Amino acid sequence: MNFHVLTLFPEMILQGMNTSITGRAIAKGLLSLEAVNIRDFAFNKHQKVDDYPYGGGAGMLMQAEPVYLAYASIAERIGKKPRVVYLTPQGKVFNQEMARELALEEDLVFLCGHYEGIDERVLEEIVTDQVSIGDYVLTGGELPAMVMMDSISRMVPGVLNNQESGETESFAGNLLEYPQYSRPEEWHGKKVPEVLLSGHHENVAKWRREQSILRTLKNRPDLLKKADLTNKEWNYVRQLKKQWKEEEESL
Ligand code: ADE
C-alpha cells in the first residue's frame, strides 16, 4: 500500500504515521508514505495557497491550481489516476467496511483541506471519494487522513502480527468486543470473572459472545440490528431488553 498525502502540514503526517505499528510497517516496506506539500506548487511570489471566496462569507479557501499541480505530480509519477480521498465533514461517514475496501488499492491519495475548504472545481476534477470521520468539525483534514490510514493499514497483510490481529475484534460481525482482563486476579477489590479462570474453553467462548451482545445492545443498538445472531441469541437480546424495561419501571 502506497499512501500519498496532499497537505499544508507534511511534518504532522510524517510524525504521526512514523510511530508505533504504522511506523514499523513503513520501516518494513509493507507501507510507503509520502507527504506532498501543496505550498510547493504555489508558483507565486509569496507561495500563497488561499484566497477569498466569491460571493463573500467568512474565511479563506484553498485555491484550485496548487492542489491540482500537487495531485498531478503524484499521478504522473505513479503513471495512473489514483483514487483520491478528500477529507470533509460533508463526506460519507468512514467505517470498518470502507477501511477493508480501501486497503485493496495499491495507491491512495488523501487530500487534506484547511481554512474554509477547497475550490469546488478542483474537487470535481480529481476527487473520487469524499469521506468524513464523524459528525464533528476539525480544523483540517490531517487528523482524519491519519485516522483513515491507521485503520486501512491494519487491513494490509503483514502489518499486524498474529498477536495483534485477533479475529474477534470490534465490528467483526457487527458486534463490539467483549471485556478483557489480565493479572492480577483481583485489583481494587474487583475480581476477574470466574469463568475466565476456569480453563473451560467452551464456557469462556460462550461468556465472551454474551458479553459482546450485551455491550452492543447497550452502546450500539444500531449495530446490533445488522448482527448475525442465532435464534437463541435473539431470544437472549429480547430477554435482556425485557429485564431492563422491568428494572426501569420499578424505579
Ligand atoms: N475536516 C474537518 N472535519 C472533518 C471530519 N469530521 N471528517 C473529515 N474531514 C474533516
Image (tube, rainbow, N blue to C red):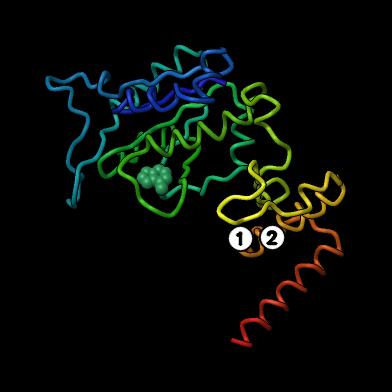
Question: With 201 as the anchor, is 157 left or right in this view?
Answer: left
Residue 62 visible at all: yes
Percent of width and height locating residue 95: 57, 45
Per the image, label 1 sits on a secondary structure element best described as loop
Percent of width and height locating residue 130: 47, 42
Q: Residue 18: name its quadrant.
A: top left
- Where the C terminus falls, by quadrant? bottom right
Question: With 21 as the anchor, is 75 left or right in this view?
Answer: left
- Where the N terminus falls, by quadrant? top right
Q: Residue 30: name its quadrant.
A: top right
Is 27 located above or below residue 106 in the figure? Answer: above
Find the distance from the CA under tag 2 to the CA under tag 1: 7 Å
Is 159 located above or below residue 121 in the figure? Answer: above
Name which residue type carries label 1. Arg
The residue identified by callout 1 is 220
Q: Residue 97: name its quadrant.
A: top right
Pointer 2 and pointer 1: residues touching (CB < 8 Å)? yes
Name which residue type carries label 2. Leu
Name the disc covering residue 224, or none.
2
Question: With 41 as the anchor, is 233 left or right in this view?
Answer: right
Ligand 1 is within 8 Å of the C-beta of the residue at disc 2:
no
